């Protein structure tokens, strides 16, 4: 139940950002809602664009190449014109492949499939006509997603480091406790004078252990303050980017 709520919350967040970037352009939003990814690093192929294009020309499936082109265009604003041409070329090739398939299924009487292909062809025409707008929105969307990804990775790293520190603290305290118990047993075997000296040594050890415990507590408080400060800075950064997007 909790996982489903989190997934819905994330979907709403993604939809909200995309809607914000598309504004009143319903057609652009409808297109990008199908062609943009919340987690691009996981969803988009790591293969080079040239390789994906070659594979697409053999298989007839140009979607991985299109996804890659849109993502790369978003990361390379200085090469925007080149990527517009690449996307338009991929759209043209996709339309050609779909038209051939559409003719085939129409001859076979598969009207529903033919109608579906017709809609997809119109979708590719839209991509070719609006390539620049698609790249502009995708650039802002993916920039935000990559920043969030970096924040999440750093947050997870800090969380793992905190768990390691806590485990080490527990282990240290367990060892210190075991040491006290062992010395207590040893004292029972000692003479009066030797026992008195051992008790003094135990007091010194306890004071030292208490000092170390306090130092660890101070380090933990310092780490928690730094965690809150980092969270506040990340939140401020998100708000600043949001204002900048609205200003544009």
Image (cartoon, rainbow, N blue to C red):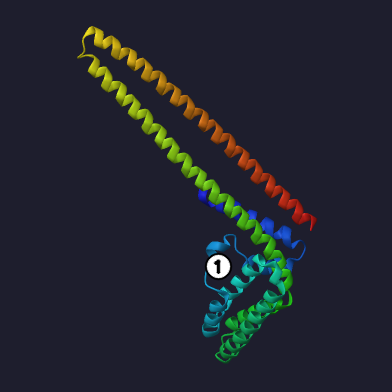
Q: Which residue lies furthest to the top in this view?
A: 192
Identify which residue is drawn at 33% across, 29% down.
Answer: 175
Residue holding disc 1: 44
Specify the quadrant of the image occupied by residue 25: bottom right
Figure disc tally: 1
Disc 1 secondary structure class: loop
Residue at the limit of the structure toward the bottom, as seen here = 107
Q: Left of 14 or right of it: where is 54?
A: left
Q: Quadrant of residue 50?
A: bottom right
Q: Which of 139 and 80 is in front in this view?
A: 80
Describe residue 109's horizontal placement relative to residue 242 as left or right.
Answer: left
User: Which is more toward the observer, 13 or 213?
Assistant: 213
Name the residue rendered at 41%, 18% in the picture.
Answer: 207
Could you say which is closer to the camera, residue 218 or residue 106?
A: 218
Query: Is there any visible trace of residue 35 in the rendered image?
Result: no
Horizontal side of 244 relative to 71 (left or right) equals right
Residue depicted at 73% across the width and 49% down the height? 240
Mark 1 crowd level (few <14, some 14–19, many ≥20, 10 Å Cα): some
| Residue 215 in view, yes or no | yes
Image quarter of residue 63:
bottom right
Above/below status of 103 relative to 201: below
Q: Residue 71: give x, y in percent of width and height.
A: 62, 67
- Residue 132 at what x, y percent from top left? 73, 72
State the image coordinates of residue 247 (x, y, percent, origin top left).
80, 55
> 74 or 23: nearer the eye?
74
Q: Is residue 1 left or right of residue 25?
A: left
Query: In the image, is residue 236 above or below residue 130?
Result: above
Which quadrant is home to the C terminus?
Answer: bottom right
């Amino acid at each position: 139940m909790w996982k489903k709520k989190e997934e819905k919350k994330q979907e709403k967040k993604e939809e909200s950002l995309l809607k914000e970037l598309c504004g009143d352009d319903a057609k652009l939003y409808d297109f990008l809602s199908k062609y943009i990814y919340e987690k691009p690093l996981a969803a988009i192929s790591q293969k080079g664009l040239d390789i994906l294009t070659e594979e697409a020309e053999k298989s007839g499936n140009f979607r991985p190449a299109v996804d890659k082109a849109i993502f790369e265009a978003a990361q390379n604003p200085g090469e925007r014109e080149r990527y517009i041409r690449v996307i338009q070329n991929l759209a043209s090739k996709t339309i050609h492949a779909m038209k051939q398939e559409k003719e085939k299924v129409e001859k076979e009487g598969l009207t529903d499939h033919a109608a579906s292909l017709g809609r997809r062809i119109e979708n590719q025409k839209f991509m070719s006509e609006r390539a620049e707008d698609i790249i502009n929105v995708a650039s802002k969307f993916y920039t935000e997603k990559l920043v969030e990804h970096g924040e999440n990775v750093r947050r997870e790293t800090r969380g793992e480091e905190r768990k390691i520190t806590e485990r080490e603290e527990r282990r240290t305290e367990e060892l210190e406790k075991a040491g006290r118990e062992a010395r207590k047993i040893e004292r029972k075997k000692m003479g009066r004078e030797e026992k008195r000296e051992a008790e003094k040594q135990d007091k010194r050890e306890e004071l030292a252990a208490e000092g170390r415990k306090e130092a660890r507590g101070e380090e933990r408080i310092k780490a928690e303050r730094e965690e809150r400060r980092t969270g506040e800075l990340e939140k401020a950064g998100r708000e600043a980017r949001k204002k900048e997007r609205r200003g544009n």
